Image (cartoon, rainbow, N blue to C red):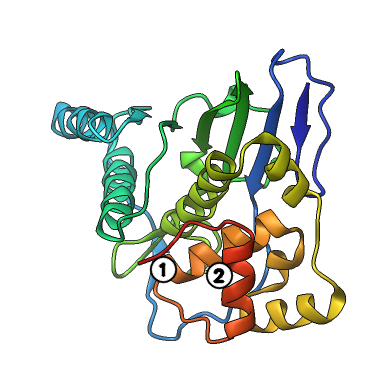
Amino acid sequence: MRVFSVHRVIDSGAMSPRKKVHTEASRHFRVPCNDTCSINFCAIRPASISYIKPIKKIESALKKLGVNAILLYDGSEKNLILAKKMQVCFAKLKEKNITIPKMTVDFVNWRNVFVSKDSAAVTDISWEHNKPIIEVFFKPKSYTQQSAAGDLFRIKEMPQNSTFESDFFHEFAHAHQGFLCGEKKFNQLRNEKFDQKINDKIAREINSYATQSKTEFVAEYFCYKMTGKEIKSKMINELYKQCNGPEIC
């Protein structure tokens, strides 16, 4: 049986005999564009051995962290940029001493995942003998914009909150929470919300998407912290710990 989270789609389970939790990143909250942000379309050069070799090297480096990285999809300049961003994201996790569970990160097999058309990333977690099997899929073609700093992002009006980096940390939080909690507790958190008073505070401090469920709260909190944003509320920080969010040193 396959279970889809949030409000998007319910699949009957024909794709897999395992129990699978499925979460998507298509976060449509609005954040004002920074006026200093120069936005243009990402230049894409065709496949080249000069891009393919470093992509394969990044895959090998991530394998040493216990990450099965499937990153080579067309060997273009954009493919290399995204692969480098992936490596940087894992390096940030290591810097923060955050445990990295065994997982697959995949740029190639997006089409095999049943998701809404607006989604750019999805985390599938299945359990076999109480051990999580974690797969995180990204849709590279979603990242059509590039900032002056070189960050790839999806939505022109929301450059800061639709970057590859923000999607990665959002999905990693789902993966880590599932790894830490186990199937029963993770499914419980996935179907629970805070009361309206707390959700109003979360919406003000983080965003409205974080009020969808306790798992989306953890994912958005972690994303915010890992991308350099500050969350001042002691109550929200405590709720994050109670929901088994990845510990950020």
Asked which quadrant contains residue 36, the reply is: bottom left
The amino acid type, in three-letter code, at marker 2 is: Met
Where does label 2 land, which residue?
158
Is residue 116 visible in the rendered image? The answer is no
Q: Position of residue 61 (x, y in %)?
A: 20, 34
Where does label 1 land, which residue?
227
Name the residue rendered at 64%, 59% in the picture.
Answer: 243
Q: Position of residue 200 (x, y in %)?
A: 78, 81
Residue 9 lies left or right of residue 160; in this view the side is right
Question: For this rendering, which residue is in front, 187 or 81?
Answer: 187
Name the residue rendered at 81%, 49% in the picture.
Answer: 191
Question: For this rendering, which residue is in front, 53 or 76?
Answer: 53
Element at label 2 = loop
Where the C terminus falls, by quadrant? bottom left
Name the residue rendered at 32%, 51% in the picture.
Answer: 43
Q: Position of residue 128 (x, y in %)?
A: 60, 19
Q: Position of residue 160 (x, y in %)?
A: 47, 70
The amino acid type, in three-letter code, at marker 1 is: Thr
Is residue 6 visible in the rendered image? The answer is yes
Q: Earlier in the sequence, mark 2 or mark 1?
A: 2
Name the residue rendered at 75%, 67% in the picture.
Answer: 211
Where the N terminus falls, by quadrant? top right
Q: How many neighbours does mark 1 have within 10 angstroms: few (below 14), some (14-19), or many (20 or more)? A: some
Q: CA distance from mark 2 to mark 1?
A: 14 Å
